[in-house]
Image (tube, helix red, strand yellow):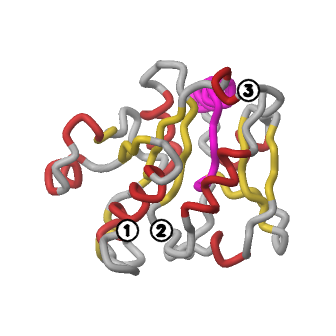
Amino acid sequence: MPESALPPLQGLVLTGGASSRMGRDKAAIAYHSAPQWRIAAERLRECGAEPFWSCSATQAVDWELGDRAILDTVPGHGPASGLHAAFSRGGSSAWLVIGCDYPNLEAQDLRCLVAARGAEHEAIAYLNAETAVIEPMIALWEPAAQQRFLRAFSSGEFSARRILGQCALHRLAPRTPQILENRNRSSHH
């Protein structure tokens, strides 16, 4: 399928909120030269995806995000609430989604997801070979996958991983297992 026939691409940085385990806003932690919320957005831009941020109202003001901030409309379900808010905006774009707590993730890793797009895939995600688990917080969600997510969410299913697993999902092997290591150290469901 020619690239021009694919839906346009937007980027979503899932920033989460204050991390109870870390005791501070994990998106504001600087693993490199800048806070993770900025690094993640730059990775998305390098892949041609204009970034939006799933964030708290405080983060939106502090980071001066303006209309690039997407606030949860149904809070309380962790990353699934952020996906729900973004996917509920309507439109026909695909969303390239990344969590803010993957310091080893590079633009080339996101470009692999983008390059794997095709009409036969509703979503593309990395598969952790060691655990045989897909990583929903580094994934590309085409409009069909977003609709599937919204239907499942409205039915009480809040596991992005389980919803992705029900899609026509293209699973990719990561360049290195380290790109899937997050600093949250919790399992994302």
Q: Quadrant of residue 32?
A: bottom left
Region in magenta: 137-155
Task: For label 1, count other residues whose C-alpha is less than 10 Å away and answer few (under 14), some (14-19) or many (20+).
Answer: many
Query: Could you say whether the residue bearing mark 2 is in a helix, strand or loop?
Result: loop
Say which residue label 3 marks.
Answer: 2
Identify which residue is drawn at 73% across, 75% down: 176
Task: For label 3, count other residues whose C-alpha is less than 10 Å away and answer few (under 14), some (14-19) or many (20+).
Answer: few
Horizontal side of 96 relative to 17 (left or right) equals right
Say which residue label 2 marks.
Answer: 101
Say which residue label 1 marks.
Answer: 36
Q: Which mark is residue 49?
A: none
Circle nearer the N terminus (3, 1): 3
Circles 3 and 1: CB atoms closer than 8 Å = no
- Of the residues shown, which amino acid type is indicated by label 2? Asp
Query: How far from the left and from the top, in percent, is residue 164?
Result: 72, 42
Image depth: mark 1 or mark 2 in front: 1
